[in-house]
Amino acid sequence: MFEVSPFNRKFAFMRRLPVFYSKTIIYLSIVYVLGHVIKSVGAIPTVGSNTVHIGLSMTGLILIAFGTGGIKPCVAAFGGDQFQERHANERMKFFSIFYMAINGGSLLSTIITPILREDVQCFGGDCYALAFGVPAALMTLALAVFVAGSGLYRRNPPEGNILVEVCNCIGFAVKNRWRRSKYESSRRHWLDWAEDKYPKHLITEIKMVLRVLVLYIPLPMFWALFDQQGSRWTLQATRMDMAFGEAFSIKPDQMQTLNALLILVFVPVFDLLIYPLVSLCRIKITPLRKMATGMVFAALAFAAAALVEIQVVRTVVEEPAAGNCLLQVYNLAPGDVRLQFPQGGDPFPDSLPYLQDPQEYLTLPLGAPSINMSLEVHYKGAASRCNVTFAQHKAYSLILHPTNAGIGCKMVKDHIMKNDKGAPLLRFLNTLSEAANISVGRETFHTSAGYSVSQNKTIMRGVYNQVRCTMASKTCPDLDLGLLDFGASYTVILLEESDKIMAHKMEDVHANNMHIAWQIPQYVLITVGEVMFSITGLEFSYSQAPSNMKSVLQAGWLLTVAFGNVIVLIVAEGAGLAQWKEFALFSALLLAVCIVFSFMAHLYKYVDPLQLDKFRSDDQNRSSSDDEYDDALNKKKQDIELNTRF
C-alpha cells in the first residue's frame, strides 16, 4: 500500500501505549471542574436555604480537593516523563517553566478574582458566584487543550497498582522478619527479608523511595511558613496603609500577586545567572543544598514579617482583658470639664477641653464582669452626677453635653476592631435639634436629634470634601470630612455654630500608618526561598524516584504541604502568642529544622536513574533466565520419569 514514515510509526506506537497518567488527569480534571461549578451554584443567594448553601459549598470543596489531589502529582510526573534520562538538563528547565506557568496562573487569579468578587455586583451584593464560575470555565478550556494534544505525548506504560505492590512487599518483609529472625542471621536491611517472594529490583526501588520519604519529614515546616502568605500576611496587610498616592490603592489579598510576579522574574534569573555564577566560584550546587538555603531565606522572611508586625500593631486597639473595659470621653460642652471617678480613681487627672479629640482609649479596671458607677462631672463651678454601667471586654465613648441643668452624659459602645478589609469605619453624632441624613459614598447615615449616634458603617477609603446632608426644616450645606483613611474609625460630630452646620471629625481608632510597601522585603525573601526550595524539590522528587514510582514520590512531596498547614493550626491555636511573636517563633523553628535537614542531606547518597534502570533490567533478565532454567530442569525430570516408567 504505502510506507509509513518513522515519525508516524513512532506516534502510532505511542497511541497504543496505556494512558494511565493522561486518563487520570482528564477524569479528575472533570471532577475538579464539577467542584467549581457546584461551589459557584452554592454562592448564589437565591438557591435554597442556608443549609443548602453550606451543603453545596462543602460538596464543591470536597470535589475540588479530590481533583487537586489526583491531578497535581500526575501532572508533574507526566511532564517529567516527556524527557529521557539523557535530557536531564532539559527536564530541569521544564520544571522551572512548569512552576512559572503555575505562578502565572496564580498571578492572574489573585488580580482578577478580587475584582470579580467585589467590583462586580450580582444578586444584590458581592459576586462570589462569578468569582468561582470563571475558574471553572477556564479549567474546562485548559482540559480541552490538554485533550487536543494527547496524540503528541510520550507515555510510559503503567505496571499495575504499584502502591499496592509496595505495601504488600513492605508488609511481607516485616512479617517474614518477625517469623524468621529468631533462627536466621540478620540481613543488611529489614526490607531484604522480602527477597523470598519479591524481586531484588523492586526491593531496591522501595528502599530508594523510603530514603527520600524519610528526607521529607522536616519539609512541612517550610510550607507552614510559606502558606501563611494567604492568611497571616494578608491579615497584616489589612492593618497597613494600602494607598499608592491619592488615585491608586490595592486590596489586601492582591499583595500576594507580588509572590507570583517575583517567581516569573526570579526563576530565569536564578537559572541563567545566579546558579552559573555560584558554580564559577567552585561551589558545588546540589538539590538538597539549594533546598536548605531556601529554608534559610523563608526563615529570614518571617523575621522581617515580625519586625513589620511590631510597627503595625501600634495603631491597633486591643480588646481589654477580663475585668477591664476601655473608655474615651467627648466633651461637647463649651469650656473645660473635669471628670472624677468614685473610690479615688482618677483616670482623667486633667481637664477635658471642648471638642478635644481623645488620643487613645484608657483602660478602666472594673474588678467584676460588670459594674455600675456614679461619676462626678465638674463644669463651670457646678458638679453633676452621671450614672453609667461598664462591662468587661467592651469599649465605650462617654459623651458629655450641655443641658439646661448643667451637664448631661450619654454612653455608647464603640467598635474598636479594624475592618477585615482595611476599610475605614464611620459614624455620626448629631448635636442638632432635628434629625439629619448624611450620604457618604454608597452609604446613608440617619441620625436623630438630641445627641444620638448613628450606626458604624464601612466606607471606601478616600477624600470626602462634599458630603450631602439633608434636614427637614434647615438648610444643611455639603460637609467636608477630609480624608477617611485605611483602618481608622471615625466619629463625625454635627454642630451648629454661628447659624452654620459644621462637621467635626474625631479619630477613635488611628489610621494605619505603616505602608504596605514594607511587606515587599518579606515577599522577596520568601520568593527566593520558594525558587530554591519548591522548584528544586519537584525536580529532585522526580529524578530520585524509580520509573514506575514517579507519581508516588510526587504525591509524597505534595503531602508535605498538607502537613505544613496542620503545623500552622497547631502552633497558632496552641501557642496563643501575639502575632509578631508567632512570626518570630515560626522563623526560629524553621532554622532549627533546617539544621536537622542539612545533617540528613549530608548523609543522603544521590541515585543515578540510568544505573537503576540497568540494574532493574539485569535483575529481570536474571529472573527470566532462572525461570527458563527451572522450566528446563522440570522438563528433564519429567522425561526421566517417563523413560523409567516404560
Image: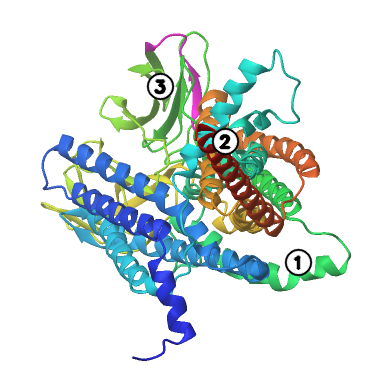
| Residue identifier under label 2 | 579
Can you say which quadrant of the picture contains the N terminus? bottom left
Residue 164 pos. (x, y %):
46, 37
Q: Which residue is at a point 50% across and 27% down the rendered structure image? A: 573
Residue furthest bottom as drawn = 2
| Residue identifier under label 3 | 377
| Residue identifier under label 1 | 275
Q: Is residue 383 left or right of residue 207?
A: left
Q: Is residue 232 above or below residue 27?
A: above
Q: Which residue is at a point 38% across and 45% down the rendered structure image? A: 490
Q: Is residue 275 above or below residue 236?
A: below
Of the pair 387 and 382, the residue shown nearer to us: 387
Q: Is residue 98 above or below residue 54?
A: below
Q: How many marks?
A: 3
Residue 504 pos. (x, y %):
37, 49
Helix, strand or loop at label 2? It is helix
Q: Which residue is at a point 19% across and 39% down the rendered structure image? A: 449
Extent of the magenta region: 361-372
> Is 259 colored magenta in this rendering?
no
Helix, strand or loop at label 1? It is helix
Residue 466 pos. (x, y %):
30, 64
Which tag, 1 or 2, sits closer to the chain's start?
Answer: 1
